[in-house]
Amino acid sequence: MPTAPWQPPRPGPQPLPTALDYFPGNSPLVATGSNLGQLWSQVSQDLKGYPALQGWVGNILSNWSNRRGIPLTDQILPWVDGTYAWALLPDAVSPVLSSANALSPDTPNWLFAYEQTQTDQAQQLARHIDDLAGQQELGVSPFQLAGRQVFAWTRLVPQGPNNSSGKGNLTFKTEVTGAYANLENQKILASSPEALGLGLGAGSDALSQQKQFLEAIAPFDRPHQGLLYLDWPQLKPLLDQNIPGLSTLESWAYPLFNRLQSLALSSETETPQSLHSQWYFRFLSS
Protein backbone atom coordinates (compact mmCIF):
# COMPACT_ATOMS: atom_id res chain seq x y z
CA MET A 1 0.00 0.00 0.00
CA PRO A 2 1.62 3.34 -1.01
CA THR A 3 2.58 5.73 1.74
CA ALA A 4 0.53 8.93 1.87
CA PRO A 5 2.55 12.10 1.29
CA TRP A 6 3.45 14.08 4.38
CA GLN A 7 1.09 16.90 5.21
CA PRO A 8 2.13 19.80 7.44
CA PRO A 9 0.48 19.72 10.87
CA ARG A 10 -2.49 21.99 11.42
CA PRO A 11 -1.29 25.44 12.48
CA GLY A 12 -1.29 26.25 16.18
CA PRO A 13 -3.26 28.99 17.88
CA GLN A 14 -1.03 31.70 16.44
CA PRO A 15 0.91 31.96 13.17
CA LEU A 16 4.67 31.59 12.99
CA PRO A 17 6.66 34.81 12.58
CA THR A 18 7.37 35.69 8.95
CA ALA A 19 11.07 35.78 9.84
CA LEU A 20 11.23 31.97 9.88
CA ASP A 21 10.83 32.07 6.09
CA TYR A 22 14.36 33.50 6.06
CA PHE A 23 15.97 31.08 8.52
CA PRO A 24 17.85 27.99 7.23
CA GLY A 25 16.00 24.75 7.81
CA ASN A 26 18.99 23.12 9.52
CA SER A 27 19.16 25.75 12.29
CA PRO A 28 19.80 23.65 15.41
CA LEU A 29 18.61 26.18 18.03
CA VAL A 30 15.70 28.56 17.47
CA ALA A 31 13.76 30.93 19.72
CA THR A 32 10.68 32.72 18.47
CA GLY A 33 7.65 34.51 19.86
CA SER A 34 6.50 38.00 20.84
CA ASN A 35 7.15 40.60 23.53
CA LEU A 36 10.81 39.71 23.71
CA GLY A 37 11.61 42.36 26.29
CA GLN A 38 9.50 40.69 28.98
CA LEU A 39 10.60 37.17 28.02
CA TRP A 40 14.29 38.14 27.93
CA SER A 41 14.09 39.50 31.47
CA GLN A 42 12.39 36.32 32.68
CA VAL A 43 14.84 33.98 30.93
CA SER A 44 17.84 35.94 32.21
CA GLN A 45 16.51 35.55 35.74
CA ASP A 46 15.76 31.83 35.32
CA LEU A 47 19.22 31.06 33.90
CA LYS A 48 20.93 32.33 37.03
CA GLY A 49 20.29 28.92 38.56
CA TYR A 50 22.22 27.24 35.71
CA PRO A 51 25.53 29.12 35.48
CA ALA A 52 27.09 26.89 32.81
CA LEU A 53 24.11 27.27 30.47
CA GLN A 54 23.73 30.95 31.32
CA GLY A 55 27.38 31.58 30.47
CA TRP A 56 27.17 29.75 27.16
CA VAL A 57 23.98 31.50 26.02
CA GLY A 58 25.31 34.89 27.11
CA ASN A 59 28.67 34.39 25.44
CA ILE A 60 27.14 33.63 22.04
CA LEU A 61 25.70 37.14 21.87
CA SER A 62 27.98 39.15 24.14
CA ASN A 63 31.20 37.91 22.51
CA TRP A 64 29.92 39.05 19.14
CA SER A 65 28.84 42.35 20.66
CA ASN A 66 32.26 42.94 22.21
CA ARG A 67 34.19 42.00 19.08
CA ARG A 68 31.93 43.57 16.48
CA GLY A 69 30.45 46.60 18.16
CA ILE A 70 26.65 46.25 18.43
CA PRO A 71 25.56 45.28 22.01
CA LEU A 72 22.61 43.09 21.09
CA THR A 73 21.58 41.71 24.47
CA ASP A 74 21.06 44.72 26.73
CA GLN A 75 20.77 47.44 24.08
CA ILE A 76 18.45 45.89 21.47
CA LEU A 77 16.54 42.84 22.74
CA PRO A 78 14.56 44.64 25.49
CA TRP A 79 13.24 47.15 22.90
CA VAL A 80 11.52 44.59 20.65
CA ASP A 81 7.73 44.77 21.11
CA GLY A 82 6.51 42.71 18.13
CA THR A 83 7.25 39.18 16.95
CA TYR A 84 10.84 38.01 16.78
CA ALA A 85 12.97 34.99 15.90
CA TRP A 86 16.58 34.07 16.66
CA ALA A 87 18.52 31.11 15.27
CA LEU A 88 21.96 29.73 16.02
CA LEU A 89 24.00 28.74 12.97
CA PRO A 90 27.12 26.78 13.97
CA ASP A 91 29.74 26.68 11.25
CA ALA A 92 29.30 22.91 11.03
CA VAL A 93 25.88 23.32 9.36
CA SER A 94 27.35 25.13 6.36
CA PRO A 95 30.68 25.08 4.49
CA VAL A 96 30.00 28.75 3.70
CA LEU A 97 30.21 29.70 7.38
CA SER A 98 33.07 27.31 8.11
CA SER A 99 35.31 28.89 5.47
CA ALA A 100 34.29 32.51 6.09
CA ASN A 101 34.24 32.89 9.88
CA ALA A 102 37.83 34.06 10.29
CA LEU A 103 37.09 37.11 12.45
CA SER A 104 35.85 35.10 15.43
CA PRO A 105 36.17 31.38 14.67
CA ASP A 106 35.11 30.35 18.20
CA THR A 107 31.82 32.28 18.09
CA PRO A 108 28.87 30.66 16.28
CA ASN A 109 26.97 32.64 13.68
CA TRP A 110 23.34 33.59 14.21
CA LEU A 111 20.36 35.39 12.70
CA PHE A 112 17.99 37.64 14.61
CA ALA A 113 14.83 39.09 13.08
CA TYR A 114 12.09 41.21 14.51
CA GLU A 115 8.86 42.76 13.32
CA GLN A 116 9.16 46.48 12.61
CA THR A 117 5.88 47.65 14.11
CA GLN A 118 4.50 51.17 13.93
CA THR A 119 4.79 51.83 17.64
CA ASP A 120 6.91 54.64 19.05
CA GLN A 121 9.14 52.07 20.73
CA ALA A 122 9.85 50.28 17.43
CA GLN A 123 10.66 53.54 15.67
CA GLN A 124 12.97 54.50 18.51
CA LEU A 125 14.69 51.11 18.19
CA ALA A 126 15.49 51.77 14.51
CA ARG A 127 17.16 55.04 15.44
CA HIS A 128 18.81 53.41 18.44
CA ILE A 129 20.54 50.78 16.28
CA ASP A 130 21.93 53.53 14.04
CA ASP A 131 23.15 55.42 17.12
CA LEU A 132 24.86 52.31 18.51
CA ALA A 133 26.70 51.79 15.23
CA GLY A 134 27.79 55.44 15.22
CA GLN A 135 29.07 55.21 18.80
CA GLN A 136 31.28 52.30 17.73
CA GLU A 137 32.51 54.25 14.68
CA LEU A 138 30.90 51.77 12.32
CA GLY A 139 29.88 52.80 8.84
CA VAL A 140 27.00 51.39 6.84
CA SER A 141 27.74 50.04 3.35
CA PRO A 142 24.95 48.86 1.00
CA PHE A 143 25.55 45.86 -1.25
CA GLN A 144 23.62 43.25 -3.22
CA LEU A 145 23.07 39.81 -1.72
CA ALA A 146 20.75 37.09 -3.07
CA GLY A 147 19.16 39.66 -5.39
CA ARG A 148 18.34 42.10 -2.57
CA GLN A 149 19.90 45.28 -1.30
CA VAL A 150 21.30 44.69 2.17
CA PHE A 151 23.71 46.54 4.43
CA ALA A 152 26.96 45.78 6.19
CA TRP A 153 28.44 47.39 9.29
CA THR A 154 32.05 48.18 8.48
CA ARG A 155 35.09 49.89 9.93
CA LEU A 156 38.45 50.84 8.45
CA VAL A 157 41.48 49.17 10.01
CA PRO A 158 44.91 50.78 9.33
CA GLN A 159 47.66 48.54 7.97
CA GLY A 160 51.23 49.80 8.61
CA PRO A 161 53.61 51.51 8.70
CA ASN A 162 55.61 49.18 10.91
CA ASN A 163 58.55 51.44 11.78
CA SER A 164 58.73 53.57 14.94
CA SER A 165 58.94 56.88 13.03
CA GLY A 166 55.51 56.32 11.50
CA LYS A 167 56.86 57.04 8.04
CA GLY A 168 55.83 54.96 5.08
CA ASN A 169 52.70 54.10 3.19
CA LEU A 170 49.59 53.73 5.30
CA THR A 171 46.92 51.45 3.90
CA PHE A 172 43.56 50.34 5.20
CA LYS A 173 41.41 47.27 5.02
CA THR A 174 37.67 47.19 5.49
CA GLU A 175 36.49 44.97 8.33
CA VAL A 176 32.89 43.77 8.06
CA THR A 177 31.42 43.37 11.54
CA GLY A 178 27.87 42.29 10.71
CA ALA A 179 25.02 42.72 8.25
CA TYR A 180 21.33 43.44 8.13
CA ALA A 181 18.39 43.58 5.73
CA ASN A 182 14.95 45.19 5.71
CA LEU A 183 12.42 42.78 4.20
CA GLU A 184 8.75 43.74 4.16
CA ASN A 185 8.05 44.50 7.82
CA GLN A 186 11.03 42.49 9.08
CA LYS A 187 14.50 43.63 10.06
CA ILE A 188 17.05 40.81 9.98
CA LEU A 189 20.36 41.22 11.78
CA ALA A 190 23.17 38.74 11.15
CA SER A 191 26.52 38.02 12.73
CA SER A 192 28.10 38.00 9.26
CA PRO A 193 27.18 38.58 5.59
CA GLU A 194 27.56 34.84 5.03
CA ALA A 195 24.94 34.09 7.71
CA LEU A 196 22.59 36.67 6.20
CA GLY A 197 23.09 35.13 2.76
CA LEU A 198 22.08 31.70 4.04
CA GLY A 199 18.88 33.19 5.41
CA LEU A 200 17.97 35.13 2.28
CA GLY A 201 18.61 32.06 0.14
CA ALA A 202 16.65 29.63 2.31
CA GLY A 203 13.61 29.47 -0.02
CA SER A 204 11.79 26.13 0.17
CA ASP A 205 14.46 24.90 2.60
CA ALA A 206 13.48 27.54 5.17
CA LEU A 207 12.78 26.48 8.73
CA SER A 208 9.07 27.31 8.36
CA GLN A 209 8.81 24.53 5.74
CA GLN A 210 10.65 21.78 7.60
CA LYS A 211 8.76 18.67 8.69
CA GLN A 212 10.79 18.06 11.85
CA PHE A 213 10.37 21.63 13.09
CA LEU A 214 6.64 21.80 12.36
CA GLU A 215 5.96 18.45 14.01
CA ALA A 216 8.05 19.43 17.03
CA ILE A 217 5.92 22.51 17.77
CA ALA A 218 2.54 21.08 16.67
CA PRO A 219 1.53 19.86 20.16
CA PHE A 220 1.44 23.43 21.51
CA ASP A 221 -2.23 24.17 20.94
CA ARG A 222 -2.65 27.08 23.36
CA PRO A 223 -1.62 30.72 22.92
CA HIS A 224 1.96 31.22 24.02
CA GLN A 225 4.48 33.97 24.46
CA GLY A 226 7.40 32.14 22.89
CA LEU A 227 8.84 28.87 21.58
CA LEU A 228 12.27 27.31 21.94
CA TYR A 229 13.32 24.54 19.53
CA LEU A 230 16.43 22.33 19.66
CA ASP A 231 17.54 19.92 16.95
CA TRP A 232 19.43 17.64 19.31
CA PRO A 233 21.71 15.67 16.89
CA GLN A 234 22.98 18.94 15.35
CA LEU A 235 23.25 20.90 18.58
CA LYS A 236 24.82 18.17 20.71
CA PRO A 237 28.46 18.61 19.52
CA LEU A 238 28.35 22.33 20.29
CA LEU A 239 26.81 21.77 23.73
CA ASP A 240 29.42 19.13 24.56
CA GLN A 241 32.17 21.66 23.82
CA ASN A 242 30.68 24.46 25.87
CA ILE A 243 28.77 23.00 28.83
CA PRO A 244 30.96 21.03 31.27
CA GLY A 245 29.38 17.91 32.65
CA LEU A 246 26.90 17.40 29.83
CA SER A 247 28.79 14.43 28.40
CA THR A 248 28.65 12.76 31.83
CA LEU A 249 24.88 13.23 31.95
CA GLU A 250 24.57 11.84 28.42
CA SER A 251 26.55 8.73 29.40
CA TRP A 252 24.32 8.19 32.43
CA ALA A 253 21.14 8.52 30.37
CA TYR A 254 22.51 7.14 27.08
CA PRO A 255 19.34 5.28 25.94
CA LEU A 256 17.38 8.53 26.29
CA PHE A 257 19.81 10.95 24.65
CA ASN A 258 20.78 8.48 21.91
CA ARG A 259 17.20 8.48 20.58
CA LEU A 260 16.37 12.14 21.21
CA GLN A 261 15.65 13.99 17.95
CA SER A 262 14.29 17.34 19.09
CA LEU A 263 13.09 19.25 22.10
CA ALA A 264 10.55 22.07 22.04
CA LEU A 265 9.36 24.35 24.82
CA SER A 266 6.55 26.88 24.92
CA SER A 267 6.13 29.64 27.48
CA GLU A 268 2.68 30.76 28.52
CA THR A 269 2.00 33.74 30.76
CA GLU A 270 0.05 32.76 33.88
CA THR A 271 0.39 36.06 35.71
CA PRO A 272 2.42 39.22 35.03
CA GLN A 273 5.05 37.78 37.39
CA SER A 274 5.25 34.17 36.21
CA LEU A 275 5.52 31.97 33.13
CA HIS A 276 4.20 28.45 32.65
CA SER A 277 6.13 26.14 30.31
CA GLN A 278 5.21 23.09 28.27
CA TRP A 279 7.91 20.66 27.07
CA TYR A 280 7.70 18.27 24.15
CA PHE A 281 10.36 15.66 23.35
CA ARG A 282 10.53 13.73 20.07
CA PHE A 283 12.47 10.46 19.99
CA LEU A 284 13.66 8.23 17.20
CA SER A 285 11.19 5.38 16.81
CA SER A 286 12.46 1.92 17.70
Image (cartoon, rainbow, N blue to C red):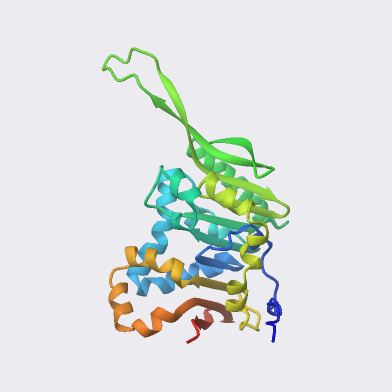
Q: Is residue 235 left or right of residue 125?
A: left
216 and 46: which is toward the camera? 216
What is the count of numbered marks?
A: 0
* Residue 145 in picture, x, y percent from top left: 63, 42
Q: Residue at x 62, y 73 (%)?
A: 211
* Residue 133 in picture, x, y percent from top left: 53, 41
Regarding residue 210, the answer to whether it shows in the image is yes
Q: Residue at x 32, y 16 (%)?
A: 166
The residue sitting at the front extreme is 1
Q: Is residue 181 above or below residue 272?
A: above
User: Can you say which quadrant of the picture contains the N terminus?
Assistant: bottom right
213 and 181: which is toward the camera? 213
Q: Is residue 20 above or below residue 286?
A: above
75 and 264: which is toward the camera? 264
Q: Is residue 148 above or below residue 11?
A: above
Q: Is residue 221 above or below residue 170?
A: below
* Residue 89 in picture, x, y percent from top left: 49, 58
Regarding residue 272, the answer to whether it shows in the image is no
* Residue 237 in picture, x, y percent from top left: 38, 65
Q: Is residue 178 left or right of residue 169?
A: right
Q: Residue at x 49, y 47 (%)?
A: 70
